[in-house]
Amino acid sequence: MEAKAKSHAKKTLSEGSLPVIVFSLFFSWLLSFSFDGQVLHAITSCYEVSAQPYAFGAMASHFAGLATCSLYVTSIKKAKSLILASIAFCIAASCVFFSAPSFLWKAALLSASFLVGACVAAWGFYFKNCFSNEDRAGAIASCLIFSNALMVLINLAAMHLSAQAGLGSSIFALFAAFAFALKLPKASQAPIDLEAAGPQGEGRASLAGPLAFICLFIFAATISSGLMYQIVNPEFAHLKILASWYWVVPYIGAMLIMRRRPGSSKRAYSLYISIAMTGFSFILFLLLGRGWQDYLVINTLMLGACGIHDLFWWSILGQMLEFGSNPAFVMGAGLGANVMGVLIGGIAGSEFAKSSSGTHNSTLLALSVVCAMQLMLPALSSQLSKLLESQAYTAPGSKAGPKQKQQATALGIAEQLTVSENKVMLLLIQGKPYKAIASELSVSENTIRTHVKSIYAKAGVSSKAELSYLVLSQQQAAGQK
């Protein structure tokens, strides 16, 4: 039994760690190169070519990939195939930039960016299937921390060694991502009929409202990133050595703090703190000088707020995977809003800088826009919470009363389960996390995971949302008889 438990724990660790490793490596290339990264800027500078048209075009193409992925990726098997194909193509596309500028640059970058968008959306299948609802916030925090840390190393190579060294480092990250992606599980999953009736069809319908709000929330939260890049960063360009690495420190620090805060309700209070941090950072940008001390203060506030925002909406997006039948649809919509916010913020910041007479006026314009967008966040967050709570079978805090428990045990699904599995199922549909269930039943979390997999298999479902929906449907049917 002990050997079996160790084997299961090893398998669980592998299933959980591989998606994080692949995402972190692939995302480090995305952040350092195609997504307006430092490597792209370093290469274009070598040939005295403007990086802005390439960066904005790549973002638009990236958005298109995110928006369309769910149309052709409907299973984890297809997701793995797309991920491998995308990484391989990005390696070839990156190699094009070792040559002089030509039409191949734009063709390679736009094509790669489209595939990257689709690849990131497809990763939602692993985000959903390899992590429980309560584990997803920690998983995405790890992904964002590792990918940003790797990105800084690639940026340092591009800035302090050569543009080619940075490009080579980013390609090496892609090769490593491809090697680990080969080991990703490709468990068979039936193609998803998004128009079908039942849990999937109704899940898609119930998803529309909350997803629209989370997309609006993400857009409002990330538009300041584009403005910051065009307004604030150029003013500290003379601090090349410090700016090449320190800017990511407060971002990662905020992630580490946030991932240790239990409960989404407490994270919501952090949202107000991040809004205040963003406002103060722009105000101090107007009042302070351009020395290294000023940079530390402004950057710490601004990037710390970005870290809080990002993990906040990523966590909610992870929860929303329980609603929909196709994770690529949820991930594509949410991250598409993120890309669009950065793109529009970047274009607006660029225009502000051109049309305004001096940094002071452009900063005031940027500050006005950021404040307006940031003030929307609490209202959006409150409305989103209400929408999520209204979904009885997916709400994290929903609890079944004694009568519901008695009904559940009398249902047909319960007859297929063992005594232990019934106990786990009743606690699971109450919204309790694995850790709490394990503690209440005095068993290990791995045992709970094993029971949950067995329950899903016997019930013919693939998530807690579908299980809860099935139980509630059977309760209603039993009540009508």
Image: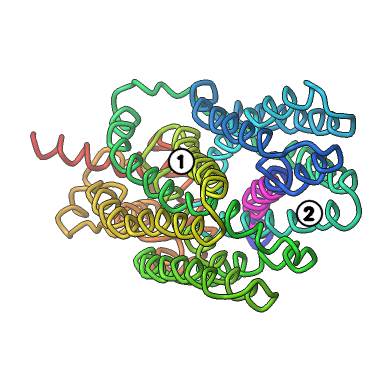
> How far across and how far down the image is residue 103, in percent?
78, 21
Q: Is any atom of residue 415 visible in this view?
A: yes
Name the kind of residue labelled 2 in the image. Answer: Asn
Q: CA distance from mark 2 to mark 1?
A: 26 Å
Name the residue carrying label 2: 155
Query: Element under label 2?
Result: helix
> How far across and how far down the image is residue 360, in percent?
52, 62
Callout 2–callout 1 Cβ contact below 8 Å: no
Does residue 321 appear to the left or right of 303 in the view shown? left
Give the class, few, some or many, for how many residues have Cα within 10 Å of label 1's Cα (few <14, many ≥20): many
89 lies above or below 183: above
* Nearest to the observer: residue 104 or residue 202: 104
Q: How many marks?
A: 2
- The outermost residue toward the bottom is 293
407 lies above or below 382: above
Quadrant including the N terminus? bottom right
User: Would you say residue 18 sits in the magenta stretch?
Assistant: yes
- Rendered residue at 18%/41% (across/down): 475
> How far across and how far down the image is residue 293, in percent?
66, 79
Q: Magenta: predominant secondary structure element?
A: helix
Does residue 457 appear to the left or right of 300 in the view shown? left
Does residue 404 appear to the left or right of 21 in the view shown? left
- Rendered residue at 75%/56% (across/down): 150
Magenta-colored span: 7-24
User: Would you say residue 420 sits in the magenta stretch?
Assistant: no
Quadrant including the C terminus? top left
Name the kind of residue labelled 1 in the image. Answer: Ala
- Rendered residue at 29%/50% (across/down): 388
Name the residue carrying label 1: 337
Q: Is any atom of residue 135 visible in this view?
A: no
> How far across and how far down the image is residue 174, in percent?
78, 40
Earlier sequence position, callout 2 versus callout 1: 2
